[in-house]
Image (cartoon, rainbow, N blue to C red):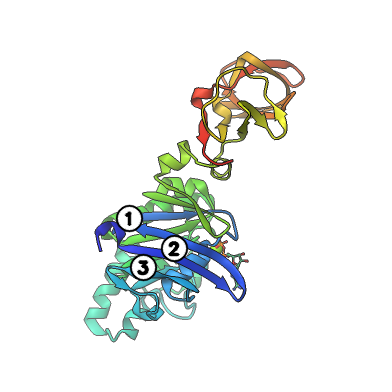
Protein backbone atom coordinates (compact mmCIF):
# COMPACT_ATOMS: atom_id res chain seq x y z
CA UNK A 1 0.00 0.00 0.00
CA UNK A 2 1.14 3.54 -0.67
CA UNK A 3 -0.29 6.61 1.01
CA UNK A 4 -2.00 7.37 -2.31
CA UNK A 5 -4.08 4.21 -2.09
CA UNK A 6 -4.85 4.21 1.61
CA UNK A 7 -8.43 3.29 0.79
CA UNK A 8 -8.95 1.35 -2.44
CA UNK A 9 -12.28 0.29 -3.91
CA UNK A 10 -11.73 -2.16 -6.70
CA UNK A 11 -14.50 -3.29 -9.05
CA UNK A 12 -17.10 -2.71 -6.37
CA UNK A 13 -20.60 -3.79 -7.36
CA UNK A 14 -23.40 -3.16 -4.89
CA UNK A 15 -27.08 -3.83 -4.95
CA UNK A 16 -30.27 -4.53 -3.12
CA UNK A 17 -31.77 -7.84 -4.19
CA UNK A 18 -31.88 -7.76 -7.98
CA UNK A 19 -31.34 -3.99 -8.17
CA UNK A 20 -27.79 -2.97 -9.03
CA UNK A 21 -27.13 0.39 -7.31
CA UNK A 22 -23.38 0.73 -7.94
CA UNK A 23 -21.50 -1.01 -10.73
CA UNK A 24 -17.78 -1.86 -10.94
CA UNK A 25 -16.64 1.17 -9.02
CA UNK A 26 -12.88 1.80 -8.88
CA UNK A 27 -11.63 4.51 -6.55
CA UNK A 28 -8.45 5.09 -4.57
CA UNK A 29 -8.18 7.67 -1.85
CA UNK A 30 -4.97 8.94 -0.29
CA UNK A 31 -4.21 9.10 3.39
CA UNK A 32 -5.46 12.37 4.84
CA UNK A 33 -7.43 13.25 1.75
CA UNK A 34 -10.86 14.87 1.90
CA UNK A 35 -12.88 13.47 -0.98
CA UNK A 36 -16.41 14.52 -1.85
CA UNK A 37 -18.87 12.17 -3.53
CA UNK A 38 -21.11 14.44 -5.56
CA UNK A 39 -24.18 13.47 -7.54
CA UNK A 40 -27.93 13.66 -7.76
CA UNK A 41 -30.26 11.72 -5.51
CA UNK A 42 -30.23 7.99 -6.23
CA UNK A 43 -26.81 7.86 -7.94
CA UNK A 44 -25.37 5.49 -5.33
CA UNK A 45 -23.54 7.75 -2.88
CA UNK A 46 -25.06 6.36 0.32
CA UNK A 47 -24.81 2.80 -1.00
CA UNK A 48 -21.07 3.28 -1.58
CA UNK A 49 -20.62 4.69 1.94
CA UNK A 50 -22.56 1.82 3.48
CA UNK A 51 -20.29 -0.67 1.74
CA UNK A 52 -17.14 1.09 2.98
CA UNK A 53 -18.58 1.14 6.50
CA UNK A 54 -19.38 -2.57 6.31
CA UNK A 55 -23.15 -2.19 6.44
CA UNK A 56 -23.69 -3.66 2.97
CA UNK A 57 -21.82 -6.64 1.53
CA UNK A 58 -20.62 -6.14 -2.07
CA UNK A 59 -21.80 -8.61 -4.69
CA UNK A 60 -18.41 -8.20 -6.40
CA UNK A 61 -15.14 -6.38 -5.84
CA UNK A 62 -12.87 -5.61 -2.91
CA UNK A 63 -12.27 -2.89 -0.36
CA UNK A 64 -8.77 -2.38 1.01
CA UNK A 65 -7.90 -0.04 3.87
CA UNK A 66 -4.41 0.70 5.15
CA UNK A 67 -2.98 -2.35 3.43
CA UNK A 68 -5.62 -4.85 4.58
CA UNK A 69 -8.50 -6.41 2.67
CA UNK A 70 -11.55 -5.42 4.72
CA UNK A 71 -14.20 -6.59 2.25
CA UNK A 72 -15.46 -9.26 4.65
CA UNK A 73 -14.47 -7.60 7.93
CA UNK A 74 -17.38 -6.78 10.26
CA UNK A 75 -18.45 -3.15 10.51
CA UNK A 76 -17.39 -2.70 14.12
CA UNK A 77 -13.87 -3.97 13.37
CA UNK A 78 -13.12 -1.78 10.35
CA UNK A 79 -12.05 1.43 12.08
CA UNK A 80 -14.37 3.32 9.78
CA UNK A 81 -16.55 6.05 11.30
CA UNK A 82 -19.88 7.04 9.82
CA UNK A 83 -21.77 10.28 10.46
CA UNK A 84 -25.26 10.40 9.03
CA UNK A 85 -27.45 13.28 8.01
CA UNK A 86 -29.74 12.51 10.93
CA UNK A 87 -27.39 12.80 13.87
CA UNK A 88 -28.74 9.65 15.55
CA UNK A 89 -27.76 10.87 19.02
CA UNK A 90 -29.28 9.26 22.11
CA UNK A 91 -31.67 11.98 23.33
CA UNK A 92 -31.76 10.75 26.94
CA UNK A 93 -27.97 10.65 27.34
CA UNK A 94 -25.80 13.69 28.02
CA UNK A 95 -23.44 15.01 25.38
CA UNK A 96 -20.59 13.45 27.37
CA UNK A 97 -22.24 10.04 27.39
CA UNK A 98 -23.14 10.25 23.71
CA UNK A 99 -19.54 10.99 22.78
CA UNK A 100 -18.23 8.37 25.21
CA UNK A 101 -20.66 5.66 24.12
CA UNK A 102 -18.39 3.81 21.70
CA UNK A 103 -15.34 4.24 23.92
CA UNK A 104 -17.23 2.61 26.83
CA UNK A 105 -18.12 -0.31 24.56
CA UNK A 106 -14.39 -0.67 23.93
CA UNK A 107 -13.87 -0.90 27.71
CA UNK A 108 -12.57 2.58 28.43
CA UNK A 109 -13.55 4.13 31.76
CA UNK A 110 -12.49 6.61 34.44
CA UNK A 111 -9.87 9.21 33.60
CA UNK A 112 -8.93 7.58 30.27
CA UNK A 113 -12.52 7.85 29.09
CA UNK A 114 -12.93 11.39 30.42
CA UNK A 115 -9.73 12.63 28.76
CA UNK A 116 -10.73 11.31 25.34
CA UNK A 117 -14.30 12.61 25.52
CA UNK A 118 -13.13 16.03 26.71
CA UNK A 119 -10.53 16.23 23.95
CA UNK A 120 -13.20 15.27 21.41
CA UNK A 121 -15.63 17.88 22.67
CA UNK A 122 -12.91 20.52 22.74
CA UNK A 123 -11.97 19.77 19.13
CA UNK A 124 -15.51 20.62 18.01
CA UNK A 125 -15.84 23.60 20.38
CA UNK A 126 -18.35 22.01 22.75
CA UNK A 127 -16.31 21.50 25.92
CA UNK A 128 -18.82 23.58 27.89
CA UNK A 129 -21.78 21.45 26.81
CA UNK A 130 -20.79 18.04 28.19
CA UNK A 131 -23.66 17.95 30.68
CA UNK A 132 -26.44 18.92 28.28
CA UNK A 133 -28.75 16.57 26.48
CA UNK A 134 -29.19 16.65 22.68
CA UNK A 135 -32.69 18.20 22.75
CA UNK A 136 -31.14 21.20 24.53
CA UNK A 137 -28.73 21.83 21.64
CA UNK A 138 -29.13 23.52 18.26
CA UNK A 139 -28.96 21.46 15.06
CA UNK A 140 -25.41 22.59 14.39
CA UNK A 141 -24.31 21.68 17.92
CA UNK A 142 -25.93 18.25 17.62
CA UNK A 143 -24.09 17.72 14.36
CA UNK A 144 -20.83 18.57 16.07
CA UNK A 145 -21.59 16.10 18.87
CA UNK A 146 -22.10 13.43 16.21
CA UNK A 147 -18.78 14.42 14.64
CA UNK A 148 -16.98 14.26 18.01
CA UNK A 149 -18.56 10.88 18.74
CA UNK A 150 -17.04 9.47 15.57
CA UNK A 151 -13.70 11.24 15.91
CA UNK A 152 -12.98 9.94 19.45
CA UNK A 153 -12.97 6.42 18.03
CA UNK A 154 -9.93 7.48 15.98
CA UNK A 155 -11.21 6.00 12.72
CA UNK A 156 -8.88 5.41 9.80
CA UNK A 157 -11.56 6.80 7.55
CA UNK A 158 -14.43 9.06 8.49
CA UNK A 159 -17.50 8.89 6.26
CA UNK A 160 -19.94 11.78 6.34
CA UNK A 161 -23.22 11.24 4.53
CA UNK A 162 -24.84 14.61 3.76
CA UNK A 163 -23.97 15.75 7.29
CA UNK A 164 -24.92 19.37 6.65
CA UNK A 165 -28.15 18.95 4.75
CA UNK A 166 -30.38 19.44 7.81
CA UNK A 167 -28.73 22.73 8.75
CA UNK A 168 -29.74 26.19 7.60
CA UNK A 169 -27.55 28.06 5.12
CA UNK A 170 -25.55 30.03 7.68
CA UNK A 171 -24.82 26.99 9.86
CA UNK A 172 -23.81 24.97 6.82
CA UNK A 173 -21.07 27.50 6.11
CA UNK A 174 -19.89 27.38 9.72
CA UNK A 175 -19.86 23.59 9.69
CA UNK A 176 -17.88 23.49 6.43
CA UNK A 177 -15.17 25.51 8.12
CA UNK A 178 -15.44 23.31 11.20
CA UNK A 179 -14.99 20.13 9.16
CA UNK A 180 -11.97 21.54 7.38
CA UNK A 181 -10.46 22.55 10.71
CA UNK A 182 -11.02 19.14 12.31
CA UNK A 183 -9.57 17.45 9.26
CA UNK A 184 -6.52 19.71 9.17
CA UNK A 185 -5.99 19.16 12.90
CA UNK A 186 -6.33 15.39 12.92
CA UNK A 187 -5.31 14.47 9.37
CA UNK A 188 -8.12 11.94 9.25
CA UNK A 189 -9.07 10.64 5.80
CA UNK A 190 -12.59 11.80 5.02
CA UNK A 191 -15.21 10.96 2.46
CA UNK A 192 -17.97 13.45 2.34
CA UNK A 193 -21.24 12.85 0.50
CA UNK A 194 -23.22 15.75 -0.87
CA UNK A 195 -25.61 16.64 -3.66
CA UNK A 196 -24.59 20.29 -3.30
CA UNK A 197 -21.86 21.28 -5.76
CA UNK A 198 -20.89 24.43 -3.82
CA UNK A 199 -20.27 22.32 -0.73
CA UNK A 200 -18.12 19.84 -2.64
CA UNK A 201 -16.16 22.58 -4.40
CA UNK A 202 -15.38 24.46 -1.20
CA UNK A 203 -14.47 21.47 0.99
CA UNK A 204 -12.85 18.74 -1.02
CA UNK A 205 -9.31 17.99 -2.13
CA UNK A 206 -10.87 15.87 -4.88
CA UNK A 207 -14.40 15.44 -6.12
CA UNK A 208 -15.88 12.21 -7.43
CA UNK A 209 -18.95 12.93 -9.56
CA UNK A 210 -21.30 9.95 -9.63
CA UNK A 211 -24.09 9.21 -12.05
CA UNK A 212 -26.36 6.19 -12.09
CA UNK A 213 -24.08 4.04 -9.94
CA UNK A 214 -20.92 4.87 -11.86
CA UNK A 215 -18.15 7.45 -11.65
CA UNK A 216 -18.57 10.16 -14.27
CA UNK A 217 -15.49 12.23 -13.41
CA UNK A 218 -12.81 12.48 -10.72
CA UNK A 219 -10.84 15.67 -10.29
CA UNK A 220 -9.80 18.59 -8.13
CA UNK A 221 -12.50 21.20 -7.51
CA UNK A 222 -10.85 23.41 -10.17
CA UNK A 223 -10.88 20.59 -12.73
CA UNK A 224 -14.50 19.71 -12.09
CA UNK A 225 -15.57 23.36 -12.10
CA UNK A 226 -13.59 24.47 -15.15
CA UNK A 227 -13.13 21.30 -17.20
CA UNK A 228 -16.20 19.08 -16.89
CA UNK A 229 -15.80 16.09 -19.21
CA UNK A 230 -19.44 15.56 -20.03
CA UNK A 231 -22.78 17.29 -20.45
CA UNK A 232 -23.88 15.70 -17.17
CA UNK A 233 -21.02 17.20 -15.12
CA UNK A 234 -21.20 20.54 -16.96
CA UNK A 235 -24.88 20.81 -16.19
CA UNK A 236 -24.23 19.88 -12.57
CA UNK A 237 -21.64 22.64 -12.05
CA UNK A 238 -23.60 25.46 -13.64
CA UNK A 239 -22.77 25.57 -17.34
CA UNK A 240 -26.25 26.56 -18.44
CA UNK A 241 -25.58 26.67 -22.20
CA UNK A 242 -24.54 23.24 -23.40
CA UNK A 243 -24.06 22.45 -27.10
CA UNK A 244 -23.25 19.30 -29.05
CA UNK A 245 -20.75 19.23 -31.90
CA UNK A 246 -21.84 17.19 -34.94
CA UNK A 247 -20.85 17.43 -38.59
CA UNK A 248 -18.50 20.30 -37.80
CA UNK A 249 -21.34 22.40 -36.43
CA UNK A 250 -22.63 23.49 -33.05
CA UNK A 251 -26.08 22.27 -32.04
CA UNK A 252 -28.43 23.27 -29.24
CA UNK A 253 -30.69 20.26 -29.14
CA UNK A 254 -31.78 19.76 -32.77
CA UNK A 255 -31.14 23.36 -33.86
CA UNK A 256 -27.90 24.39 -35.54
CA UNK A 257 -26.16 27.52 -34.26
CA UNK A 258 -25.34 29.91 -37.14
CA UNK A 259 -21.72 30.36 -36.10
CA UNK A 260 -18.89 30.02 -38.62
CA UNK A 261 -16.03 29.78 -36.09
CA UNK A 262 -13.91 26.64 -36.30
CA UNK A 263 -14.73 24.15 -33.59
CA UNK A 264 -12.41 21.99 -31.50
CA UNK A 265 -12.39 18.19 -31.80
CA UNK A 266 -14.84 17.58 -28.95
CA UNK A 267 -18.27 16.07 -28.39
CA UNK A 268 -19.66 19.33 -27.13
CA UNK A 269 -19.05 22.81 -25.76
CA UNK A 270 -20.43 24.34 -22.58
CA UNK A 271 -20.64 28.04 -21.72
CA UNK A 272 -21.34 29.56 -18.35
CA UNK A 273 -23.82 32.46 -18.55
CA UNK A 274 -21.07 34.91 -17.67
CA UNK A 275 -18.87 33.82 -20.62
CA UNK A 276 -21.60 34.63 -23.15
CA UNK A 277 -20.49 38.00 -24.54
CA UNK A 278 -23.55 40.22 -24.60
CA UNK A 279 -23.80 43.42 -26.66
CA UNK A 280 -21.85 42.55 -29.81
CA UNK A 281 -21.20 39.54 -32.01
CA UNK A 282 -22.50 37.45 -34.90
CA UNK A 283 -25.52 36.03 -33.05
CA UNK A 284 -28.66 37.73 -31.82
CA UNK A 285 -31.55 37.08 -29.50
CA UNK A 286 -34.62 38.75 -28.05
CA UNK A 287 -34.58 39.41 -24.30
CA UNK A 288 -37.31 37.27 -22.76
CA UNK A 289 -36.41 38.15 -19.19
CA UNK A 290 -33.79 39.98 -17.17
CA UNK A 291 -33.28 39.79 -13.42
CA UNK A 292 -31.01 41.78 -11.17
CA UNK A 293 -28.59 39.60 -9.20
CA UNK A 294 -26.41 42.11 -7.38
CA UNK A 295 -23.15 42.36 -9.31
CA UNK A 296 -24.71 40.97 -12.50
CA UNK A 297 -27.95 40.97 -14.48
CA UNK A 298 -29.14 37.57 -15.62
CA UNK A 299 -30.65 37.49 -19.10
CA UNK A 300 -32.77 34.85 -20.77
CA UNK A 301 -32.61 35.24 -24.56
CA UNK A 302 -34.82 33.67 -27.22
CA UNK A 303 -32.79 32.90 -30.32
CA UNK A 304 -33.46 31.11 -33.61
CA UNK A 305 -31.75 28.02 -32.12
CA UNK A 306 -33.24 28.06 -28.61
CA UNK A 307 -32.84 29.61 -25.17
CA UNK A 308 -29.53 31.17 -24.13
CA UNK A 309 -28.67 32.34 -20.65
CA UNK A 310 -26.23 35.23 -20.32
CA UNK A 311 -24.97 37.26 -17.36
CA UNK A 312 -23.81 40.82 -17.82
CA UNK A 313 -22.12 43.20 -15.42
CA UNK A 314 -24.86 45.09 -13.57
CA UNK A 315 -23.04 48.40 -14.10
CA UNK A 316 -23.76 48.14 -17.86
CA UNK A 317 -26.97 49.63 -19.32
CA UNK A 318 -29.88 47.21 -19.10
CA UNK A 319 -31.35 45.54 -22.21
CA UNK A 320 -35.10 45.61 -21.53
CA UNK A 321 -37.36 42.64 -22.28
CA UNK A 322 -38.49 42.56 -25.92
CA UNK A 323 -35.36 44.21 -27.31
CA UNK A 324 -32.97 42.44 -29.68
CA UNK A 325 -29.39 42.01 -28.46
CA UNK A 326 -26.31 40.89 -30.37
CA UNK A 327 -24.04 38.40 -28.65
CA UNK A 328 -21.16 36.00 -29.17
CA UNK A 329 -20.27 32.55 -27.89
CA UNK A 330 -16.47 32.82 -27.45
CA UNK A 331 -15.31 29.29 -28.31
CA UNK A 332 -12.00 29.81 -26.48
CA UNK A 333 -13.81 30.32 -23.18
CA UNK A 334 -16.01 27.23 -23.44
CA UNK A 335 -15.47 23.93 -21.67
CA UNK A 336 -14.76 21.16 -24.19
CA UNK A 337 -16.85 18.09 -23.44
CA UNK A 338 -15.46 14.64 -24.27
CA UNK A 339 -18.90 13.08 -23.90
CA UNK A 340 -22.24 14.55 -24.83
N1 LIG B 1 -32.67 -0.30 0.94
C1 LIG B 1 -32.80 -0.25 -0.40
N2 LIG B 1 -33.52 -1.17 -1.06
C2 LIG B 1 -33.63 -1.15 -2.41
N3 LIG B 1 -33.07 -0.21 -3.19
C3 LIG B 1 -32.36 0.76 -2.58
C4 LIG B 1 -32.18 0.80 -1.15
N4 LIG B 1 -31.41 1.87 -0.85
C5 LIG B 1 -31.14 2.47 -2.02
N5 LIG B 1 -31.69 1.82 -3.05
C6 LIG B 1 -31.56 2.19 -4.49
O1 LIG B 1 -30.20 2.21 -4.83
C7 LIG B 1 -29.90 3.34 -5.65
C8 LIG B 1 -28.85 4.21 -5.01
O2 LIG B 1 -29.37 4.74 -3.80
P1 LIG B 1 -28.50 5.62 -2.79
O3 LIG B 1 -27.15 5.00 -2.65
O4 LIG B 1 -29.28 5.80 -1.55
O5 LIG B 1 -28.38 7.00 -3.59
P2 LIG B 1 -27.87 8.44 -3.09
O6 LIG B 1 -27.32 8.31 -1.72
O7 LIG B 1 -26.85 8.84 -4.10
O8 LIG B 1 -29.08 9.32 -3.14
C9 LIG B 1 -31.23 4.06 -5.88
O9 LIG B 1 -31.75 3.63 -7.11
C10 LIG B 1 -32.08 3.60 -4.73
O10 LIG B 1 -33.44 3.58 -5.07
MG1 LIG C 1 -27.90 9.28 0.07
In what element is the residue under mark 2?
strand
* Residue indicated by mark 3: 148
| 288 shown above or below 94 | above
Of the two numbered discs 1 and 2 in the rendering, the one whose residue sits closer to the viewer: 1
Q: Which quarter of the frame holds ligand 1?
A: bottom right
* Mark positioned earlier in the residue sequence (1 or 2): 1
- Distance Cα–Cα, label 1 vs label 2: 13 Å
Circles 3, 1 touching at the beta carbon (< 8 Å): no
* Residue indicated by mark 2: 160
Percent of width and height locating residue 88: 49, 73
Q: Nearer the viewer, residue 270 or 144?
A: 270
Q: Nearer the viewer, residue 26 or 104?
A: 26
In what element is the residue under mark 1?
loop
For label 2, being within 8 Å of ligand 2 is answered no
Q: Is residue 6 left or right of residue 142?
A: left
Percent of width and height locating residue 141: 44, 63
| Residue at x 24%, y 84% (from the top left corner) | 110
Amino acid sequence: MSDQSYLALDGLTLGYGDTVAVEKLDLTIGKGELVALLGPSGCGKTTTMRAIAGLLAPSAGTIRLDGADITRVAANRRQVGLVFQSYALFPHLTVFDNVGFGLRLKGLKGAALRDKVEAGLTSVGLAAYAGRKPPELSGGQQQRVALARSMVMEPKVLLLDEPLSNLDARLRLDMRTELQRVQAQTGVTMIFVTHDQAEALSLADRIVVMRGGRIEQIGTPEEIYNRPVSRFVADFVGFENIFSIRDGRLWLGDAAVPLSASLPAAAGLAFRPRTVALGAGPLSGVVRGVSFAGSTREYVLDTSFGTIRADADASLPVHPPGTTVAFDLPIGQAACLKAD
